[in-house]
Image (cartoon, grey):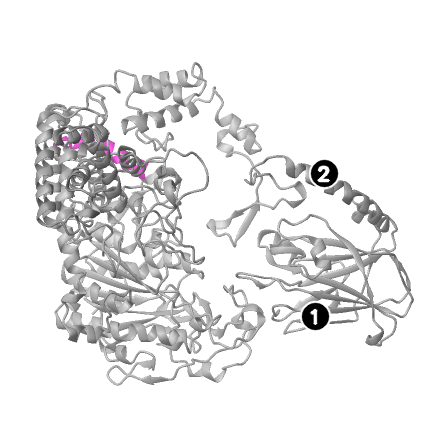
Amino acid sequence: MSLEARTRWQPLHANRATSTGQAKLVARLSEGDGVPEVIATGTITLNSIYTVDVPISAGGVFNALRLEVLPDDLERAISLPEPGFVLSRIQVKWLPSGDEAQAVDIPLETGYDEDPDAFFEVEASLSDDPGGWCGYPRFHRKRTAVFIPTKPVTLPAGSSLRFVLSQNMQSSGIKAQAIRRLRIAMSPDASWTDLLEAQSLRRAELNTLGKEIDRIPSVAVPVMAEQPLNQLRETRVFLRGNWLTKGALVAPGVPALLGPMLVTNRLQMARWLTSPDHPLFARVAVNRFWEQLFGLGLVESSEEFGTTGQEPSHPELLDWLAVRFARELQFKPKTLLRELVLSATYRQDSRVSSDLLARDPRNRLLARGPRQRLTAEMVRDQALSASGLLSSKLGGPPVMPQQPEGIWRTVYNGGKWVTSPGDDAYRRAIYTFIRRTSGYPSFQTFDAPSREYCTVKRLPTNTPLQALVTLNDPVYLEAAKGLATRMLTAGNTTEQRIARGWQLATGRPMTPRETSPLMELYRQAQQRITDDPKDASALGQTTELAALTVVANALLNLDTVLTR
Amino acid sequence: MNALTRTAYLQQEHLASITRRHFLQRCTTGLGAMWLAEQSLHAAATGHAALPRRDPTRPLEPRPPHFPAKAKHVIYLHMAGSPSQLELFEHKPQLTQLDHQFCPPSFLEGKRFAFIRGTPRMLGSVHPFHQESKTGQWISNQLPQFERVLDKVCVIRSMNTDQFNHAPAQFLMQTGSPLIGSASTGAWVTYGLGTENQNLPGFIVLLSGGRMVDAGKSVWSAGFLPGVYQGVQCRSDGDPVLYLANPAGIDRQLRGSVISAIEQLNRQTHEELGDPETLARTAQYELAFRMQANATDSFDLKQEPSAVHEAYGTELGKESFANNCLLARRLVERGVRHVQLYDWGWDSHGAAASEDLRDGFVKKCRSIDRPIAALLTDLEERGLLNETLVVWGGEFGRTPMAENRGGVDKRVYGRDHNPQAFTIWMAGAGVKRGHSFGQTDEFGYAVVEDPVQPQDLHATMLHLLGLDHTKLTFPVAGGLQQRLSNVTKQAVVIKKVLA
């Protein structure tokens, strides 16, 4: 039991309570438990300062003061938290008589909060520092703080205590973060004063330990942890999905229709789900890997293996892969992927006769190799890679590659899109800064999801806007220039250079038949640039480089390049 | 939901691949089977004769409506932030009598507000009202130009919604659901009807006001519909369509050469591999090449005579609502199906001068007054108003109480969000002219007659376009046929606003 809970507290009844601004303070006895309290009514103004006077009828000593702040409606607050409060500054004065001029400050040494807040520290309430004891920005249960005077205070009967409570914090949406229901109590328990001494000893020790901790290298990534038991929030059913209408209290568990299972927390859930004996996990996993490589899963509805899902096209293959993945391969994706790409099925030619196309237009029967358009991210990464621009840097914060002016707009925070300097503008697509309300335009054009839902697979489309991206987006023009620069160094003849570009873009050598349209394009580009050299320098310093950039631009737009 | 949608889709695709093999022979993309599946399911579910099949290589090709349509195009003017109906359309003398008095407790019981706390004061309209001569309708002095075309519009005073924050309320108004991820009105309209001009996107979005709509780009997304139906955000400055212009050094002729080389090489690829998708891709490059010319031309406001610029109040090279109105007319003229304008800056809370009903609000009114009047007049003069549905409105209304954020009476005047009542108007094809529909109480706080929910508006819009809102559906979540008017709501076509 905590010291606070062991302590015998003496509730204090205010005889006068006022506030600056428009709030009205009322001292009353609580209807529920008859405890004296002060409530704030009316419109609470920002920066309200409360002054609460408490008569000391019997006299005596006090070693600690306890403040409790409660939600208006304790029961309702559990499901619908109430506007919070921040006690920016607490000052306690002793008034020997009614004369305010004789008020004496009672210095407070320290304060304790029953569950320290992530935002603000209770000790900040003792000074003009920002923050302070709080339930911020909303709170749903009684909050308790104990303040200890520097030394025990003796109060003669007939005098009074004055509490001056400043509240300067506001929050978006709720605004004035002010106490709405306050209880004050004091205690003559000397254990509190003893704490002060212990604490000053501890402080030195804590400082030393703190410095040692600081010397341990660490990462600045917050780690998720469960709330301590006493701070757990209740979870209730939202009736008809409405978060304001709460139904029955619920506890973690699995749907009853799954039968009795010993799963009560997330760890158990994860272990159950990924157990090698689980009939579904390995199947779902191998099916998704298969889908990544072949375009369609063995079970086409890769997101749905339930009753509304589809039957597998090759059930025995799926079973065999699943068992192999779970047992022999011990869930190692790389080994599985290696097996899949080395399989005879995957390595088939993707050539298709019109007869086969008619019989199996979508290649469900796997009589040919898979052929699909690259994903949004691959389209970008491939172009950057072929051009030699791709940065291989791993990890770190997201980056902002080039995007046109006026597209990135944020709703509330005024954030700006500033193209990342140097190599960071050419990182792999997965490092791109993504905001759901303003996605990266060229990814969206190539069917990248907007991230509003978890998406297991994407439906590829084929639109003119995609052509405009890879033809004209400055990122792709730069890639073309980069590719042209690499082509230039590849040989002495134009043909050798174009062949090099072809190799870099497609990964295979160029056939003579493929050469002629590109040679023709090169000649046309050269002619255009010679005729009208005005803007050609944007494509390359020399006519040769500029014309190769035009060829590279075409290369990066070929069906064979955009498809795998 | 997306995942489930796709499941449903794929299931039907599976069915279709067995039963309609002949058609599939002509399909060039995987999507093709899906279109077909949707069609056959549609026919089976509704018992109606199936509409013409969708050609998967031309997902935006024009499609006939369910029944003869009044409207062929939509121009939707969304005032993001929600303009105050009490300073524009709702004349409430009784509210003026209560001006500055504390709000009666009955107004506050059981209500939740975005910003109002404690007891606010009532706020009478800060702008004077008068009766417009032709229609007899009351209107404030903030829209003097628009007032002259009031006889062309149908004012709906009884809109109400169940969302009191911007983003969900905008989603509800624009997609039929307050949650992110549903298909926007424009996406449904182009899904239902395709678009007439294949050289321009069918659903174009134009922004003004300097900031993004609160709900972000998802408010014009295709949601669970295929991605081709998402709105294409165009700019009134710079390239109208992203990456439309060729880069410096590549002129149109040279671009033509590049595309010709791509076409030749793709043809070789197709000969070798036989994948029909390759041909479809080549077709998209040719379309892109045509779009470069057509879109550039459509967005070139310089082509308009000075009298038109004068009428709209356009300023070349600037991002403005006026420019967007003129662009909307040019786009509709060229056969674009749905043009969606979002104008940001109507959230008149009174927290700053820009949100003051006597300052920022007045400037916003000035920025839309002339362009809207010009747009309606221009459309009519060109014979386009009788085939174009124009809709104007925000996502909710504003309170008859003044806002008291932070518990202080403000030096500037503003109002909080009020989902219970707001005013929108519709004009053009098939809509009554000079008409007023619906009634609110004496304070403009809640609807008392002919309530209209967003889904009723959607049903009505689709009706005017010749589409039955219960039949324009798409399978989501394990076979549920979702629709713009949202299956969870009882949506009705508002017959009384139809001409």
Q: Residues within 10 Å of mark 1 (few under 14, many from 20)?
A: many
Q: Nearer the viewer, residue B68 or A213?
A: A213
Horizontal side of residue A462 vs A169, given as left or right: left
Amino acid bearing label 2: Leu
Residue receiving disc 1: A25
Amino acid bearing label 1: Leu
Q: Residues within 10 Å of mark 2 (few under 14, many from 20)?
A: few
* Whether residue A321 can be seen here: yes
* Whether residue B440 can be seen here: no
- Residue A24: percent from left, percent from top: 67, 72
Task: Give the vertical position of B3 relative to B488 (above or below).
Answer: above
Task: Give the vertical position of B142 relative to A229 (above or below).
Answer: below
Horizontal side of residue A163 vs A21, given as left or right: right
- Residue B221: percent from left, percent from top: 31, 50
Per the image, label 2 sits on a secondary structure element best described as: helix
- The numbered mark 2 sits on a residue in which chain? A
- Residue B426: percent from left, percent from top: 26, 68
Q: Which segment did they paint magenta? A: B6-25
